[in-house]
Image (tube, grey):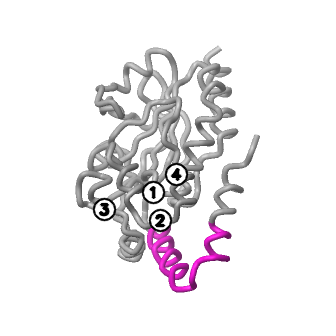
Amino acid sequence: MKNLQSDIQGIIQNFRDTLPSEINSMIEQGAGEISSLSIMENALKVGDSVKDFTLNDRQGRPKQLSNYLKSGPVVLTFYRGVWCPYCNLQLKAYNDIIDNINNLGASLIALTPESKLGVSALDESALPQEAKDTIIREVSFDVLYDYKNKIANQFGLVFTLPQSHRDLLSMMEFDVEKANDENSYTFADPATYIIGDDLRIKWCFIPNNYRKRAEPQAILDALEKIQKDKK
């Protein structure tokens, strides 16, 4: 199975090789500020209980966590939005293993603070067309709109985007406030959880780093272990 972090590292290296040093300095400044936060210490972890919640999907239909859990464990992942290249790699990688997840008796849902206007906001931005072409516009799992990161906040994952990264998005003429339909500039650490039917966390990956994601194989391995432990 392809390594997601290797693909992410490829983008990081490409930015370092091709972008002006001023831009790279802004990227690294913001990355350092985010990594210094106490997200890992504050976030929910294995053994913790989560609250049931209901959020709307892209079509505006309400979706409840407990309903997903009726058919088995839920892989719950957070991402910032389609403007984030690492998030697009994440969505594609997880979409590629959706059949494997389902075959293990589980389902996958993704939570994002990005509204349905996120794609149009990116299309209207000054990003190069090749960057826009990498957007993942459709996936085979539910994407739920976590307005103002309400659920992400319950998981202890929320941070405010550093000013250097706000400036970068402004330079790209990307309208975050339009994309998220609010102006808090808050996002969730891109954590991934597996939640059992008892609403307890069975496995988690909390990177405290927006340039890291749970590996697809690690998710499948965790689901297989959960399945074996139930027998």
Q: Earlier in the sequence, mark 2 or mark 3?
A: 2
Residue at (60% x, 29% y) in the render: 98
Choose mark 2 or mark 3, whichever is in front: 2
Kindly identify which residue carries mark 2: 127
Kindly identify which residue carries mark 3: 185
Q: Earlier in the sequence, mark 2 or mark 1?
A: 1
Choose mark 2 or mark 4, whichever is in front: 2
Residue 83's disc is 1
Q: Residues within 10 Å of mark 1 (few under 14, many from 20)?
A: many
Vertical arrangement, residue 160 with respect to residue 69, above or below: below
Please, what is the three-letter code of the amino acid marked with disc 3? Answer: Tyr
Q: Residue 225 occupies which quadrant of the picture? A: top right
Horizontal side of residue 187 vs 6, given as left or right: left
| Marks 2,3: beta carbons within 8 A | no
- Indicate the position of residue 48 as horizontal and vertical percent values: 43, 38
| Marks 1,4: beta carbons within 8 A | yes
Q: CA distance from mark 1 to mark 3?
A: 13 Å
| Marks 4,3: beta carbons within 8 A | no
Horizontal side of residue 223 vs 80, given as left or right: right
Q: Nearer the viewer, residue 16 or 137?
A: 137
Please, what is the three-letter code of the amino acid marked with disc 4? Answer: Cys
Q: Residues within 10 Å of mark 2 (few under 14, many from 20)?
A: some
| Marks 2,1: beta carbons within 8 A | yes
Q: Earlier in the sequence, mark 2 or mark 4?
A: 4
Span shown in magenta: 12-36
